[in-house]
Each structure stands twice: as structure tokens, then as C-alpha cells.
Image: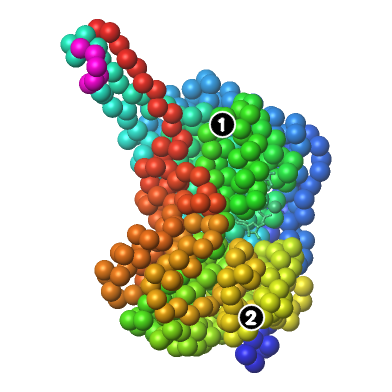
């Protein structure tokens, strides 16, 4: 891979708009205002393409969290949002979606600087996706209805029953660093449609776009206290949000480890909870596929966003009759996916988000090598001047006991295995604690349906991967999560059902 050694991995110059955002003094958005932290602690913001510190954000104190929760509580209890006519809430949310689109270029650049993802990818996926979540949910604001029932064991003329759908209340929403703006909007959108209020905490590594989102929330006219955006660490600020007695619902996306901890931490107050956690998603390639289409497709399934995707197709199972051609076709994509700085217009893959993540991923690759895996492509980090780059990596000669096969790596690393028999591959694909997503590549529609029904996963893709749409429910089986986000189910996750039974 000589091409990769000649890539210039110097991060490009930031735009004036991005510089302005980076120069802001660290503050929190609480009760419709930018406020200083009560504590004065800050967290460095790093550009993973260069390893340079480019800004600072607040590390929220306990007092800051309490202040944000109090603002959300008051804004919920006095009905300033939930009692607004749905048409007005829809209009404000639509305005927010419009504003996100108007600031698309700046938001994509900030995401690129903060996460390390190519600006082109952020502009094509993250920002339009963020706006789509808000827009889709805006439409739900006016379509949330209960039902009337005919009581079963009571006389019909004298008894009447109906349900009311009410917002669950104050939400604590905690998101990770891989799709910061998209995840922030995915979280606040259904909450707003349902009439809830929220405290959103982006990940400590990537808070820039959530802070800009707060400006847009303000400009759109969302009333004070309805959306509060605070920055800080998970084990302190995040933990306090989760345990706070005035919070009614927790929505979390992140690691399975922290998801389990949060699930335990909400038990004492029995809050509503949705958890969207990790994965080790299998991709099954059947013997009848078109290699020209499938090899780039299954490469994208793992290398998109440097593999830092909860649904990454990280376990490839290709039928033995096509295995060699598939992995060779994947190896041919090495140049396309060669990691570059996030603001390089030719970048399809950037660095990993942080030094910690770089060490983690390289640790897995080394463990795989020690365990006897062969490196078909990559397996190393390219030279750079401080950035956290890892070359796209394909490991073969692996077995189900290896950590690279069992554990979520969250990097551009795929383990490729051969299979012969369909029952056997389904069994292997399901042999995991996770159940977030899976993929099947085949021209045989019957085979696709049969395999889809047998895979233990919240989402199954056929001849594509990571195609996530706000209209379609998303969530995990097994240890990949609790509940569903997106679609109608995603709105329902922010609603309580109240039954009213009346004697006439
Ligand atoms: P994490 O799960 O620790 O962090 C995600 C979010 O949770 C962040 O906003 C963090 O501040 C918050 N958090 C952490 N501890 C918390 C606590 N005790 N209470 C409340 N909030 C808390 O993920 P991390 O450490 O950034 O990454 C570790 C691994 O997790 C990755 O290598 C990857 O395997 C996995 N991960 C999975 C994601 C997914 O989308 N499924 C996203 C990010 C990470
Ligand atoms: Mg963590």
C-alpha cells in the first residue's frame, strides 16, 4: 500500500465560522440562556486528525445538572410546551429543522473537527439525518392520539372508556461521540413531539455540534427550559442526570457496559428507559452474489465512520465458493478508505475519535495477531503527525474464541470467515451477546427472507448495510438494547398511556 505512505495527513485550515465556534467561552445552555458553570472546570476539545487541542467545554458540576433538571421540570410542569397547540409545536420544530439545514456546512465542519469524520460524510449523512429526525417528529406532534374502548365486562350504555397519550415528562438524554449531532437530534425530536422537556448531554469528546444546536433551538423559538444542553463527563454529570429524582425518563446510546450500569441506576426510581447499545453485527454473503457490488458494500459496512458505528458489519461470513473473491474485492478498496484528515476533500475515512479509542482498536488488532489471525489488509497505523489513524483492516484465519470475533472493536476492523452450510452460518451469526443488526447479501429473495427471520437482530439489511431511516424502528435484541427509537414506536417511547373509565 505505497499510496498510503504518500498521503499528507496535515489537517486543513478551519473556516472562519468554525473558528468562531471554537473560540466561544465554555458555557451551558440552561433555561433558555447561556450560563457559566457553577464549578469552573473545563474539558479540552481535541481535533483527532491532528491531536491538537482546539477548544474547551464546560465540565458540568452537580449544581449545573440540578439547575438544568429544575429548568426542565418547571418547563414540563407549567405546560409551556406540552399544552401548546400541536400545530405550534410542529411549526417550531420545523423551523429548527430548517435552521439545521441553513447551517449545514458549518455543522458538518464542526463535526469533522470534533469527531474526525470526513466533512463530506458529515455533510451527506449526519447533518441531513439530524434535520430529518426533527422534521419527521414535527409531523407526529399533531398525530398523537388515544383510543376509545368498549368495555368487555361492563354494560355498554353506562360505561365509557378511553385512553389519553401523555408525555412521560422530564427526559435525561445521553449520547455518544460517533454521530454527535445526529444522535442529539434523534433524541430530542421524539421527546419534543411528545411534549416532553429534556436535558441532553453529548459525549465529553464531541460536544461542539450539540452546543451549536442549542443556539438553533433558541433561534427556532423553543421555549426556555424545554431543551437544556449541558456538557461534561458521564460518570459525574451523566450519572447525576440518570439518578435524579425529578427525571422521568432516561434515553441512552453508548456502550453496553454503561448501558447496563444506567439500567441498574434507574431501578430505584423506576424511570422509563430506552437503551441503544453495542453490537458485533454479522454480514452473511451467499454464493450467488454479484462480487462487484457486494465487495464494496460489505467494505462500507465496516469502514464507514472508521468502523465507529454501533451497527458496523464487523463479522463477515462469506460462502466458501465466493470467500476469496469477496475478501480480494474488499482489499481493493484499501486506497478508497485510506485514512485522511477530516477536512481533506478526498477523505472517505478519517482518524478514530481519540487516543483512547486508537489504543483500544490497536490493542484488539494486536490481540488478534497474537491469537493467530492473519492480516489480509491493514493491521497497522499509518504515519501521521499526531492524529489517531488506523488503516482499514481485514483479519482472516480467525475462530469464534478470539476477542476480535467476540467483542465490539468499534474501529475499521473486520473478521472474515468462510461458511458452507446455511444452518451453520445462522448459528455462528447468532453466537454473540449482541443483537443489534445483521446483513445478508444474496439475489435469492426466498433465502433472504428465510435468513432474516432467523437472525437475532433488531434490524436486518438485505443487499445493503447501515441504511437507517427515521421512519423505521431501530433498536437491539439481547444485550444491544432496550426499547425502540424512530418511527411510531420511537414516539411511543416518550408517551404514557392513561386509561379513563367513566360511568355515564
Ligand atoms: P460510553 O458508553 O462510556 O459513553 C457514551 C456516553 O455515556 C457519553 O456521553 C458518556 O459521557 C456517557 N456516560 C459514561 N458513563 C456514564 C455513566 N456512568 N452514567 C451516565 N452517562 C455515562 O462510551 P465510551 O467510553 O465513549 O466508548 C467505549 C466503547 O463503547 C467504545 O469503544 C465502543 O465499543 C462503545 N460505544 C458504543 C456506541 C454505540 O453507538 N453503540 C457509541 C460509543 C461507544
Ligand atoms: Mg466510557
**Residue under numbered circle 2:** 373
Tag on residue 109? Answer: none
Give the crowd class for mark 2: few <14, some 14-19, many >=20 residues within 10 Å.
Answer: many
Instruction: Give the residue drawn at x 61%, y 34%.
Output: 266
Q: Nearer the viewer, residue 226 or 287?
A: 287
Q: Which residues are magenta?
A: 150-155
> Badges 1 and 2: C-beta atoms under 8 Å apart?
no
Give the crowd class for mark 1: few <14, some 14-19, many >=20 residues within 10 Å.
Answer: many
Q: Position of residue 12 (x, y in %)?
A: 67, 73
Instruction: Give the residue drawn at x 45%, y 88%.
Output: 325
> Residue at the left extreme?
157
Q: How far is the residue under mark 1 from the one under mark 2?
A: 44 Å
Instruction: Give the residue drawn at x 51%, y 45%.
Output: 482
**Residue under numbered circle 1:** 271
Query: Is 487 situated left or right of 33 in this image?
Result: left
Question: Vertical placement of 261 versus 397: above or below?
Answer: above
Query: Is 39 situated left or right of 439 in this image?
Result: right
User: In this figure, which colouring scheme has been used for the structure?
Assistant: rainbow
Question: Vertical placement of 73 versus 342: above or below?
Answer: above
Is 154 colored magenta in this rendering?
yes
Instruction: Tell whether circle 1 marks a residue whose Cβ is less than 8 angstroms from ligand 1.
Output: no
**Dividing the picture into quarters, in which one does residue 217 lie?**
top right
Q: Main secondary structure of the magenta part?
A: loop
Q: Position of residue 314 (x, y in %)?
A: 54, 69
Q: Secondary structure at mark 2?
A: loop
Tell me if I can see residue 55 in this picture: yes
- For marks 1 and 2, give the one nearer the viewer: 2
Location of the N terminus (image quadrant): bottom right
Q: Position of residue 294 (x, y in %)?
A: 40, 79
Question: Vertical placement of 40 versus 80: above or below?
Answer: below
Query: Is 245 situated left or right of 185 in this image?
Result: right
Amino acid at each position: 500500500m505505497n499510496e498510503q505512505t504518500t498521503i499528507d495527513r496535515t489537517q486543513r485550515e478551519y473556516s472562519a465560522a468554525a473558528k468562531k465556534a471554537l473560540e466561544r467561552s465554555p458555557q451551558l445552555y440552561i433555561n433558555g440562556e447561556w450560563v457559566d458553570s457553577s464549578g469552573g472546570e473545563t474539558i479540552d476539545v481535541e481535533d483527532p486528525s491532528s491531536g491538537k487541542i482546539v477548544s474547551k467545554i464546560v465540565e458540568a458540576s452537580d449544581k449545573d445538572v440540578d439547575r438544568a433538571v429544575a429548568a426542565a421540570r418547571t418547563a414540563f410542569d407549567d405546560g409551556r410546551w406540552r399544552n401548546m397547540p400541536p400545530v405550534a409545536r410542529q411549526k417550531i420544530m420545523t423551523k429548527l429543522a430548517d435552521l439545521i439545514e441553513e447551517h449545514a456546512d458549518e455543522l458538518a465542519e464542526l463535526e469533522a473537527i470534533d469527531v474526525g469524520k470526513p466533512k463530506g460524510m458529515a455533510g451527506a449523512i449526519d447533518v441531513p439525518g439530524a434535520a430529518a429526525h426533527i422534521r419527521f417528529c414535527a409531523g407526529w406532534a399533531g398525530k398523537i392520539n388515544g383510543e376509545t374502548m368498549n368495555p368487555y365486562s361492563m354494560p355498554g350504555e353506562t360505561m365509557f372508556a378511553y385512553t389519553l397519550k401523555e408525555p412521560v415528562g422530564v427526559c435525561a438524554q445521553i449520547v455518544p461521540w460517533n454521530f454527535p449531532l445526529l444522535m442529539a437530534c434523534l433524541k430530542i425530536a421524539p421527546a419534543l413531539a411528545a411534549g416532553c422537556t429534556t436535558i441532553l448531554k453529548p459525549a465529553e469528546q464531541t460536544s461542539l455540534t450539540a452546543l451549536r444546536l442549542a443556539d438553533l433551538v433558541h433561534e427556532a423559538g423553543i421555549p426556555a427550559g424545554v431543551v437544556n444542553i449541558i456538557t461534561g463527563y458521564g460518570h459525574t454529570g451523566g450519572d447525576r442526570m440518570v439518578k435524579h429524582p425529578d427525571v422521568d425518563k432516561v434515553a441512552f446510546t453508548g456502550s453496553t457496559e454503561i448501558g447496563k450500569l444506567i439500567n441498574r441506576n434507574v431501578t430505584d426510581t423506576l424511570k422509563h428507559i430506552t437503551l441503544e447499545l453495542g453490537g458485533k453485527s454479522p454480514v452473511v454473503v451467499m454464493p450467488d452474489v454479484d462480487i462487484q457490488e457486494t465487495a464494496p458494500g460489505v467494505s462500507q459496512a465496516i469502514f464507514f465512520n472508521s468502523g465507529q458505528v454501533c451497527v458496523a458489519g464487523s463479522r463477515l461470513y462469506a460462502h466458501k465458493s465466493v470467500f476469496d473473491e469477496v475478501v480480494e474485492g474488499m482489499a481493493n478498496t484499501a486506497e478508497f478508505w485510506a485514512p485522511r484528515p477530516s477536512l481533506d476533500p478526498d477523505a472517505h475515512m478519517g482518524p478514530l475519535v481519540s487516543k483512547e479509542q486508537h489504543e483500544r482498536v490497536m490493542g484488539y488488532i494486536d490481540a488478534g495477531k497474537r491469537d493467530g489471525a492473519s492480516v489480509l489488509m491493514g493491521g497497522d497505523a499509518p504515519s501521521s503527525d499526531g492524529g489517531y489513524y488506523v488503516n482499514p483492516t481485514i483479519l482472516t484465519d480467525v475462530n469464534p474464541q478470539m476477542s476480535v470475533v467476540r467483542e465490539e472493536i468499534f474501529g475499521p476492523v473486520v473478521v472474515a470467515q468462510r461458511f458452507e452450510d446455511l444452518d451453520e452460518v445462522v448459528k455462528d451469526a447468532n453466537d454473540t451477546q449482541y443483537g443489534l443488526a445483521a446483513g445478508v447479501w444474496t439475489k435469492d429473495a426466498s433465502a433472504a427472507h428465510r435468513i432474516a427471520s432467523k437472525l437475532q437482530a433488531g434490524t436486518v439489511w438485505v443487499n445493503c448495510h447501515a441504511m437507517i431511516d427515521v421512519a423505521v424502528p431501530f433498536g437491539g435484541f439481547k444485550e444491544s438494547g432496550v426499547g425502540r427509537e424512530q418511527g411510531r414506536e420511537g414516539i411511543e417511547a416518550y408517551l404514557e398511556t392513561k386509561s379513563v373509565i367513566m360511568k355515564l
